[in-house]
Image (spheres, rainbow, N blue to C red):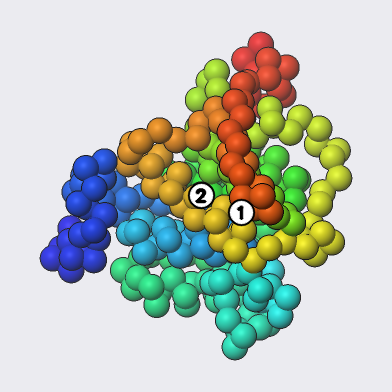
Amino acid sequence: MNDDQLLRYSRQIMLPSIGIEGQQQLLDARILIIGLGGLGSPAAMYLASAGVGSLVLVDFDQVDLTNLQRQIAHTTERIGHPKVESARETLRAINPDARIETIARRLDGASLAEQVDKADLVIDASDNFATRFAINKACFAHQTPLVSGAAIRMEGQISVFTGQAGGPCYHCLYPDEGEIDETCSANGVLAPLVGIIGSIQAVEAIKQLTGAGKCLQGRLLLLDALQMEWRTLRLTADPACPVCSTT
C-alpha cells in the first residue's frame, strides 16, 4: 500500500475491525457485480471508493431516460451508452486506482461459472428470478460468497449466502423457480430505496472480505420504507433444496 492509498483510505483504516490488514484484503479482492442498475450503481460506487482492487461489471443493457431516477452511476449525457461503460466512467472518476473490467452481455452456463470462480465475492444486483437462480447455483458450486439484494415499490431485502455446506442458499428462500417476476417498470420503485439496499450490499461485501463484524449469513433483512421499519428473518437450509441439499 503506497502513501496515497494510506491517505485515501485513512478513515477506513482507522476502524479497528478493518485496519491495514483489512484494507489490503480489499485492495487484493475481485468482486463480480451483476447488474448496474438501481442496486448495482451504489454498490459499485461504494466498493470502488472503499478500495476494492478489482471490479468486474456485468450488464447487457444501455442507459435509458427512465433509469436516471434511481440508477445513480449514469448521467443524462450517457443515454444510449452501455451501462457497463457508463458505470466504468463513474467509478474511474471516483477512484482511478480501481481496476475495472466490463462485460456487456448476459453471463450464463460456462461463462457465468468462469467469472464466479474467478471472483472473491459476487454482488447480485439483477432484477429477475432466472438470473438470481443461475447466480446462486454458480456461487454455491464454487463456494463463492453471494450478497443478494432486491427492491421494488417501497420494499427491499438483503441477505448473504456464503456457499458453505449446511447453510441456506437463495433457492432455499425462493424454492419456486416458476414464480412470476415483479419488475420496477411494471410496479414502480422509490429512488432512494435502491440506494439504501445497494449501499448495504456494499457494506456486507466489505465485511465478508475483511472478516469485520457479523454478516447477514442465515438472516434476511427486510425494509418497509413507507413505514420505515426494518425486520430480520432467520433463514435455514431447505433439506430438499435442489441446489444446496447434501442428501
Mark 1 crowdedness (10 Å alpha carbons): few <14, some 14-19, many ≥20? many
| SS for dot 1 | loop
Measured in 3D between alpha carbons, the distance from the residue under mark 2 to the one under mark 1, in whole angstroms, is: 9 Å
* Amino acid type, label 2: Gln
In this rendering, the answer to whether 180 lies above or below 218 is: below
Q: Residue 125 carries which label?
A: 1
Q: Visible in this render: residue 199?
A: yes
| SS for dot 2 | helix
| Residue at position x 80%, y 36% in the image | 177
With 64 as the anchor, is 207 left or right in this view?
left
Where does the image place residue 11, in percent across and percent down from the top left? 23, 58
| Residue at position x 56%, y 71% in the image | 72
The residue tagged 2 is: 201
Of 61 and 174, the residue lying toward us: 174
* Amino acid type, label 1: Ala
Of 68 and 83, the residue lying toward us: 68
Q: In which quarter of the image is the N terminus?
A: bottom left
Where does the image place residue 121, in percent across and percent down from the top left? 47, 44
Q: Do the residues labelled 2 and 1 touch (CB within 8 Å)?
A: yes
Where does the image place residue 234, in percent across and percent down from the top left? 59, 25
Q: Visible in this render: residue 112?
A: no
Q: In which quarter of the image is the C terminus?
A: top right
Where does the image place residue 60, in percent across and percent down from the top left? 67, 65
